[in-house]
Image: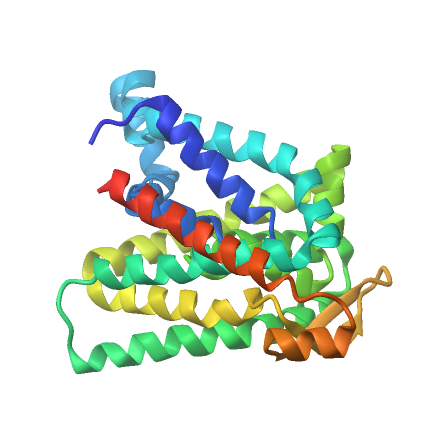
Amino acid sequence: MKRQPLGIFLRGAGMGAADAVPGVSGGTIAFISGIYEELINTIKQFGPSAFGAWHQGGWRALSHHLNLTFLMPLLAGVAVSLFSVAHLALWLMEAHPLLLDGFFFGLVAASALVVGQASAGWKLWYLLPLLVGLLLAQALPGMMPLVLLIGNESVVVMVAGCIAISAMLLPGVSGSFLLLTMGLYGTIMGAIRSLDLGIIVLFGMGCAIGLALFSRLLSWLLRRHHTSTMQLLLGFIVGSLPVLWPWRELLRYQMGPEGQMIPLEHRYLLPADYAVLTGASAQVAGVVALMAFGALIVVLINRRAN
């Protein structure tokens, strides 16, 4: 299906904006906007086969093989959004965390319905990949601090890039949130804002490795086991929702290598309990309104994509 470059650019901008916020995945935006499988299959094309295409047909064949008319405006949108939203996302996280979480909770919850509707038919054994997705979404954040045990800072940044970009390809699993649980979110976002090329290059190398490996795995799963893979993705999305619940209390954390606080466990509260515990307004009206707005955006985007 031929798409206009501006439409692809805007989808990329949405992915970049989502990836800048811990708790939301750019893969979610790609899915609801109708480009998820094309994105995975396009990334998979980067490899030895690209040299064969170039050797046989030159630059025109290479461009077609790599689907550059799709990929270039998409990456441009992601890059522009990441560099511009990096400042805004950090400010919103500090100034209006409840409202930001409410908006993305509604967006991701509605995305779960979109993914659920994409599955053709239903069989009892599909509960297995759904459960696996749920469990992995819950377990991954707790495992991320182990990355810091590697010790070598350069290797840690590369491994973090590999993990984060793989998570960003999955609807529901937030690469930014996994960076946060590694204690590296501030480091990476700060490097992007200040154009620290040393960290950006190391992180980019890790991302390239993650993309090359994980896109091939996802493409194979979608081609061979499409419906069960959709159930796995649905499990990831539903399992990631607690991370975005606005009213929560941090129960357990650890300190990162640069003195930053890495959240490990939360208790999820009702708005009234949150207000009593914190002594601050739960902002129920604003949060619920933004939940509904986030869900509405998903419905409109998905309807247009269809």
Q: Is 158 placed left or right of 191 in the picture?
A: left
Q: Is residue 186 left or right of residue 173?
A: right
Image spot of residue 149 (x, y percent): 73, 70
- How far across and down, in percent of the image, does residue 295 sit? 40, 54
Question: Dividing the picture into quarters, in which one does residue 160 lie?
Answer: bottom right
Query: How has the structure been colored for display?
Result: rainbow
Whether residue 265 is visible to the viewer of this picture, yes or no, is no
Q: Is residue 154 left or right of residue 112?
A: right
> In this view, which residue lies farthest toward the left?
121
**Does 185 appear above or below 269?**
above
Q: Is residue 296 visible?
A: yes
For the C terminus, the quadrant is top left
Q: Is residue 131 above or below residue 185?
A: below
Q: Is residue 275 left or right of residue 137?
A: right
Rendering coords of residue 24 (x, y %)? 52, 55
What residue do we see at 68% from left, 40% from top? 88
- Taking the spot 47% from the left edge, 48% from the top edge, the residue there is 26
Give the number of marks: 0
Q: Quadrant of residue 262?
A: bottom right
Residue 132: name its quadrant.
Answer: bottom left
- Which quadrant holds the N terminus? top left
Q: Please determine whether, in this image, residue 250 is positioned above or below residue 92.
A: below
Q: Residue 282 or 106: which is nearer the viewer? A: 282
* Along the line of sight, the residue nearer the viewer: 271 or 171: 271
Q: Position of residue 184 (x, y in %)?
A: 72, 56
Residue projecting furthest to the right: 259
Residue located at (37% from left, 57% from top): 111
